Image: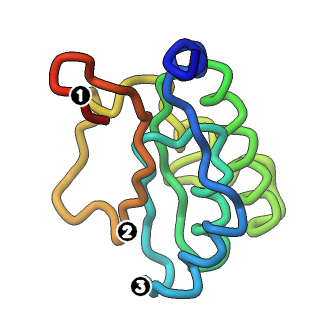
Amino acid sequence: MTRLANVERAGYFPLPLSVTKLICSHITATKDGRILDPCAGEGTALVTLAEKLDLDPFGVELHEGRAKAAREAVGQLLVSRHGSDKGDAAAPHGTRILHDSYLSLVTSRGGYNLLYLNPPYDHDDEDGRL
């Protein structure tokens, strides 16, 4: 039964906000840098880390509904920072979250200061591991 529930959720198990905040208290990043979450989910962890560490958020999410939610969350963060619904001119919030596989992402070397990764989980029947 657990396996079926996992497949239905597509391995989506977001990190609790309390744990994300705990992570924030243990790391630092270059101010005004960029954070990438290649498995962004609804963007909660991405936005929390970006806000607490003063980073520009970027993410990738395979699931269409979660990508839309992440795009909205990033948009709200950018509005709170810039006072505009367009975000910054270099990368408006609509382009900050890609609805695609992270395997399709092409980025420049040194493009991000911080990588946050909480990948989808599933069990491999052949090898018996996550």
Residue marked by disc 1: 128
Place of residue 33 in the rendered image (x, y in percent of width and height, measured from the top left) = 43, 74
Of the image marks 1 and 2, the number of the one nearer the N terminus: 2
In front of the other: 84 or 98 = 98
Residue at the (75%, 69%) spot, across then down: 81
Residue marked by disc 3: 30
Place of residue 28 in the rendered image (x, y in percent of width and height, measured from the top left) = 45, 87
| Residue 103 left/right relative to 50 | left
Cα gap from disc 1 to disc 3, whole angstroms: 39 Å
In front of the other: 27 or 16 = 16
Cα gap from disc 3 to disc 2, whole angstroms: 9 Å
Cα gap from disc 1 to disc 2, whole angstroms: 31 Å
Tag 1: amino acid: Gly
- Note whether 7 is above or below 31 in the view shown: above
- Note whether 96 is above or below 6 in the view shown: below
Give me the disc on residue 114. Answer: 2
Tag 3: amino acid: Thr
Q: Does dot 2 land on a helix, a strand or a loop?
A: strand
| Residue 30 left/right relative to 71 | left
Q: Does dot 3 land on a helix, a strand or a loop?
A: loop
| Residue 84 left/right relative to 114 | right
- Note whether 103 is above or below 15 in the view shown: above
Residue at the (42%, 59%) spot, across then down: 116
In front of the other: 5 or 116 = 5
Place of residue 64 in the rendered image (x, y in percent of width and height, measured from the top left) = 60, 18
Q: Does dot 1 land on a helix, a strand or a loop?
A: loop
Of the image marks 1 and 3, the number of the one nearer the N terminus: 3
Residue at the (56%, 22%) spot, across then down: 2
Front disc: 1 or 2:
1
In front of the other: 110 or 124 = 124
Q: Quadrant of residue 30?
A: bottom left
> Marks 3 and 2: CB-CB under 8 Å?
no
